[in-house]
Image (cartoon, helix red, strand yellow):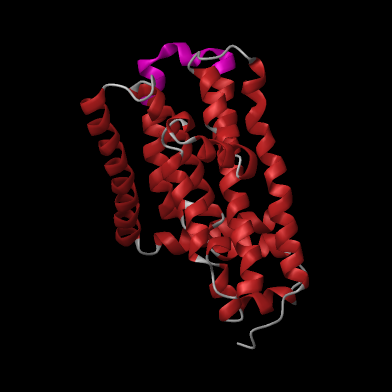
Amino acid sequence: MSLYLKYLSMHLKASLEYKKAFILSLISKMATSLFSVVSIIFLFDKFGNIDGYTFENVLICFSVSYLGFSTAECFFRAFDHFDRMIGNGEFDRMLVRPKNLVLQVLGSEIEFNRIGRTIVALIIFITVLVRQPELLKLDRLFTLILMMVGTIIIYAALFILKAGITFFTTQSLEIMNIFTDGVRELAQYPLSVYHKWVQNFFTYILPIALVNYFPLLYVIGKTNNKFYMFLPTMSVLFVIPCYIVWKIGLKKYRSTGS
């Protein structure tokens, strides 16, 4: 843990060496998130509601999805760019160091400017809480926190899965962006607005619904089933197959010779 904190400190100092560039990058990430919010505003200005969900309901989905994705992207970015580490031989150097490989990969690249999206998501989340004080009830607030933590875990596991597949392909597969950036956009809205097969896929295969849609139903009062409160904890189980792919890929890894 102390080693990872040193990594964090090192990357933060490096980012702040060029303060203006860092601030501009942070603002640009915030701007892209704000544009997504504007599109939601225009949508509800036209239709009023979506499948019975209000503007505030969708803002909960948006803030949870963006906060989870941006946080995972910030601290697990190295797994997203793992093909570069294999290609330039950096991963080979890690293999000879007497430290945990996952920890080394985590610490090799941390992009603090990605927190710009997290800031926007938190502002929107707080705005929703102010506009809907009933969400401050202990059970609902607890569920919202679990949703955010569970979403971070899901996206982090996806980045690890992407890196694990890269062991076999050497180059990163662009199709994996569908399950990272694509899922971030899809999870902005309640899953019930999509086709049934989409709902099933993102419930039983890639369980984003367990950390986003089903707990939302409890938070907004569409169900009183308290089991939905704890569904985000199931996100931990999704880490297992993703980590298994990583371990299998690691065993079969052969240096690129860079």
116 or 225: nearer the viewer: 225
Q: How many marks?
A: 0
Q: Is residue 1 visible?
A: no
User: Which of the 4 image quarters holds residue 94?
Assistant: bottom right
**Can you tell which quarter of the image residue 255 is in?**
bottom right
- Across and down, in percent, residue 162 comes to 59, 61
Q: Nearer the viewer, residue 135 or 216?
A: 216
Q: Residue at x 56, y 25 (%)?
A: 215
Q: Which of the pair 46/9 is nearer the observer?
A: 46
Q: Which one is nearer the viewer's eye here, 128 or 54?
A: 54
The residue at 57%/68% (across/down) is 82
Q: Quadrant of residue 85?
A: bottom right
Q: Which quadrant is home to the C terminus?
A: bottom right
Q: Is residue 92 above or below residue 19?
A: below
Position in image of residue 24 (x %, y %): 29, 56
Where is residue 64? Give x, y as percent. 47, 34
Q: Is residue 126 magenta?
A: no
- Please report the residue visible at 49 percent of the width from the left and 15 percent of the height from the top: 136
Q: Is residue 136 magenta?
A: yes
Q: Residue at x 26, y 38 (%)?
A: 39
Up the image or down, 240 lies above or below 176; here it is above
User: Is 37 on the left or on the right of 82, as rendered?
Assistant: left
Q: Is residue 59 left or right of residue 240?
A: left
The reply to whether residue 252 is in sight is yes
Name the residue at the bottom extreme: 257
Question: In this picture, is 54 found above or below 12?
Answer: above
x then y, percent, for residue 196: 51, 35
For the stretch drawn in magenta, the main secondary structure is: helix
Q: Give the residues in magenta.
A: 127-140
